[in-house]
Image (spheres, coloured by chain):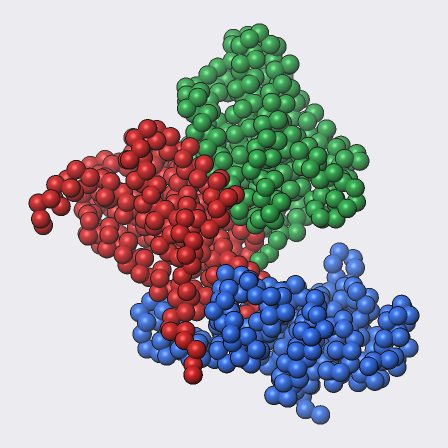
Amino acid sequence: MLAQQLFNGLVVGSIYALFALGFTLMFGVLGVVNLTHGFYLSIGAFVALYATQHGVAIWLALPLAALASGVIAIVVDGLLLTPLRRAKASELASLMVTLGATLLLYSIANAALSTDIRRFPPGVIDGSAIDLAGVRVTLTQCLIVASAAGLVAALLWLMNGSRLGMGLRALAERPDTAALMGVNAGALVRLVSLISGGLAGACGVLIGLNYNAIQPYMGEVMMLKGFAVIILGGLGDIRGALVAGLIVGLLETLTAGYVASSVKDGVGFALLVLTLWIRPSGLFGRIAVKRA
Amino acid sequence: MPEFIDDFLFTYQTLVYSLGINGLLALSIYVVLALGQLSMGQAAFMGMGAYVSALLTVKLGVAFPLVLLAAMLLPALAALIVGAPTLRLSGVYLALATIGLGEVQRIFFLNSELTGGALGLSGIPMKGGLVSIYGSLGLALLACIFVARSRIGRAMEAMREDELAAGALGVDLPAYKLAALVVSAMLAGLAGALNAHVTSFISPEDYGFHAAVSILSYALLGGIGSPFGPVLGAFILTLLPEVLRSLADYRGVVSGAIIVLVVIFMPRGLLTWRMGRVGAATRRPS
Amino acid sequence: MSAPRLEIEALTVRFGGLAAVDDVSFSVAPGTVHGLIGPNGAGKTTLFNLISGLVAPSGGAIRLDGQRIDDLPSWGRARSRLARTFQNIRMFQDMSALETVMTGMHTRLGEGLAASLLRMGGFRKAETGAVARAWELLAFVGLADAARRRSGDLPYGDQRRLEIARALALEPRLLLLDEPAAGMNPSETLALEDLLEKLKAQGLTILLVEHDMHFVMRLCDRITVLNFGRRIAQGAPHEVRADPRVVEAYLGARVARSLEAPQ
């Protein structure tokens, strides 16, 4: 029973971590909390849904969905946040714009797609499960954990082991001087949008597979979990988001299993408020919290 | 009351009430925006006020003034718990924590038997009315004007423009932020209670993310140079779907688009007039 | 010699491993103008931020008239009547010049929420008094004619003087001026010097960071020289000017020349 709960928690936690990574990356590099992040998750799920409905295999639909979400993230950032960045607008101005954009995008998606719950075509992924030392493991769950691990590894390599990562870190530290050092800031901003939107899109496909339910507002539900994870992990801390995602996923699953499933959704928020009171710099305390 | 006013009220009662309540909500977010903070918890505070007041009236039969008081105190407490730890941090934390509060409260309302779950609460007696709604709005507006035209108003504008410089002039930044957040939560709670007692029915979805963004759009459209701006914004955005019926189905699109467009192209809002911050004549002494 | 107005004792701050201000001690006597100079990156502005409470020290003590102030937040220090200006002017753009100066009276005017709401007691009297005082201060810095203009619309030199008026509104025991002459043209600099001479004549205690050496040498009673976060010299202007360590710190021969030969 406990082993099964822990495994389920790991699966949910991988999804949360994947979602929060893009969120926190965006803040860490560009200094913006982009609330439209949840919307990219919905986009990813719908792209994969349409692709699979048209006979595309899921292993191809997943990267396709990530790419589509990433491209939309680039467009949204270019239209809304680039002008503010250029005008050196305040942090809150960017936050408010993404807030308005979130409602705008959801409302449009809602009108265009309706709020009915959709499901992937049957047989999109083998539904059978295997028994591993008493733990029931489905192929979907394996796909979720494997994709999450692969994407996280790729992101960590990109940030820490590549030239691009150096440029990104330079951009995060000193946006003005980064440009002088020959860092193509515009291109990097688009790259960050692509990665972050892509991660959210991939996450949407995995959630859609895990619960086999897709609807436009699915990203909004994730927003609360996302906030909890990025604040627990430390705003802008990539490794922190990874660990915090797993923690929130595990705690939620255990709460649902041993306390009551109705309390489950409060776990993330409770962790968020506790973190703010006790340790606002997050789990690892590496983030220098900007103080007033 | 003259007959034509009676007729008018009968036909447009709901609209007239919404105008006043939305005006009050716009002022509630103005109080925090005026010193450069962003609270996205206004809808949550409103919902808290609505549910608490409805439960107290329906289940316990508490007197209406006491109900209103409770509807202001509970959101104030929530604002303290969620807001206080964020006030020494960058403003992003308050925004995230208050959006989180709204979501978690919505989930609670949806699942709790006490609050009637997704069906909400109905049969709330019509104890509110023109006097309580517009009386509250008038008093709140007057209070905002008086406070703006004093050293407190100057300190608040100074914080919005440059927090660091305001601190160096002796403005106690965390105390101001906390006080503003608590007052703003109380105003929103009051608006929620009044709303519950004129619509007789409340449900969790009235106080979600959508409502929070709409309230912000009132203040941003109107402009925050004076307390009149947010009220004007609330009036316009409440009337707009009534005048243009076709817009009624796209309220989310309208609120969202207004915020995006105003922040990027019209950061001062419609009412660009800025109210003076001095509580006396400013003539040059001879 | 009277008790010091400001006393800095073994003040240190480290960012990461690097000490930006390293074991610095000095004191400022009441009624004097004390200069703080040093090459770029010597830690002058950091020291100012430490004194005014924008940066927390890693060690050491700061005393204002004998009272420890280093555990107070910036607004607490302002309440102890420590005022400052900023290297990059920090203006309340939308306020009128008059309102900007009145903002500086925040702690002096004690009206709370109730008094503001009910307009009771001495509220209107206090505001009227504050308006009159603000006009005086604006006249003192030569900005009376700009009183009703938007602060952000004033020319650069006027904004600097408005910032000084705003700081004076605190009725400071100690005024910190962070490069007041930066970006000013020669005539504006002269006007500023006149203004500071007037303040000095009134007995105001000033601690000043400035790059314009002639300005510093003419105005200051004592000078402390920083380099790489450490105090390397201190004394009257002529002593500091003759100190080889100071000349060496400034390295560039051009700067050394200008130190030797002020007009």
Could you say where residue B73 lies in the image, as x and y percent from the top left?
33, 54
- The x, y position of residue A225, in whole percent, is 52, 35
Chain C pictured colour:
blue
Snapshot quadrant of residue A125: top right
Give the vertical position of A1 relative to B156 (above or below): above
Q: Residue furthest bottom?
A: C1
User: Chain B drawn in what color?
Assistant: red
Q: Is residue B11 left or right of residue A88?
A: left
**Residue toward you, B268 or B64:** B268
Look at the picture and state if A94 lies above or below A219. Answer: below
Could you tell me which residue is drawn at 71 percent across and 92 percent down?
C1
Q: Which chain is green?
A: A
**Going 72% across and 28% down the picture, which residue do you hit?**
A154
Task: Determine if residue C72 is in view.
Answer: no
Q: Compare residues A59 and B144 and report the one nearer the observer.
A: B144
Q: Is residue B248 left or right of residue C22?
A: left
Please state the horizontal and vertical placement of residue A102, each as a whole percent of the image. 49, 34
The residue nearer to you, when weighing B152 against B226, is B226
Mark count? 0
